[in-house]
Amino acid sequence: MPTYGGQPYQPDDPYGGDPAPGRRGRGPLIAILAVVLLVVAVAGVFWLRRGPDDPAPVAAPSNSAAAADPSADAVQPAPSAAAPESSADPRFAKVGQCVRNEGAAGGKPKLVISGCAAKSYEVLSRIDGPTSGERDAEAKCGKVEGYTNWYFFDSELDTLDFVLCLKQR
């Protein structure tokens, strides 16, 4: 058989020899990275939507009259998730309504809208807007005649903040 370029011609091998070992493409690596990124993105969305574990509401009685009643020591609002208007959540308390503390004595208080009865608090004024804490709430309620206690909710979003000026019944 004649040789071509120093190599014998082989009709069964049209390219002149064994092909080079196959190189795996990058397809599987890209697919794995895409799946990992998708899992991380989904986990991030769930983490962001879950919000903080412990909201930043703060409340305290404004004078010593409430100190005699342990259930009136402080009040805590519900989490910042939206609730229907018919809710007993203090975020929906209006002037003239009453609220009561359902929290354990000496523990975390829980303020809920209730009927006006003994040991409840009547809402004398509601001041919506940013609040900076206890001093701010006390200053705002100081202008309300007849208040005995105040309550404020300070969230990460200032548009959700409010102060309630209360009168113990």
Image (cartoon, helix red, strand yellow):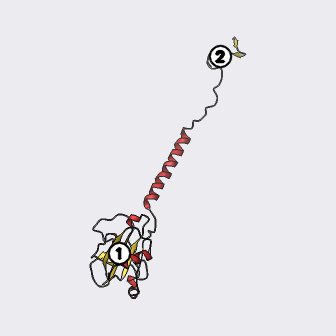
Mark nearer the N terminus (1 vs 2): 2
User: Would you say residue 126 is visible in this rendering?
Assistant: yes
Residue for badge 1: 164
* Closer-to-camera residue (128/43): 128
The residue depicted at 27 percent of the width and 83 percent of the height is 117
Position of residue 42 relative to residue 126, above or below, is: above
Type of amino acid under label 1: Leu
Q: What secondary structure is marked by label 1?
A: strand
Residue 94 picture quarter: bottom left
Q: What secondary structure is marked by label 2?
A: loop
Q: Residues within 10 Å of mark 1 (few under 14, many from 20)?
A: many
How far from the left and from the top, in percent, is residue 43?
A: 48, 55
Instruction: Give the foreground label among 1 and 2.
Output: 1
Residue 83 picture quarter: bottom left
Mark on residue 10?
2
In the picture, measured across the screen, residue 1 lies left or right of residue 105, that is: right
User: Would you say residue 109 is visible in this rendering?
Assistant: no
How far from the left and from the top, in percent, is residue 161?
A: 39, 68
View extreme (front): residue: 143
* Closer-to-camera residue (148/17): 148
Q: Residues within 10 Å of mark 2 (few under 14, many from 20)?
A: few
Type of amino acid under label 2: Gln
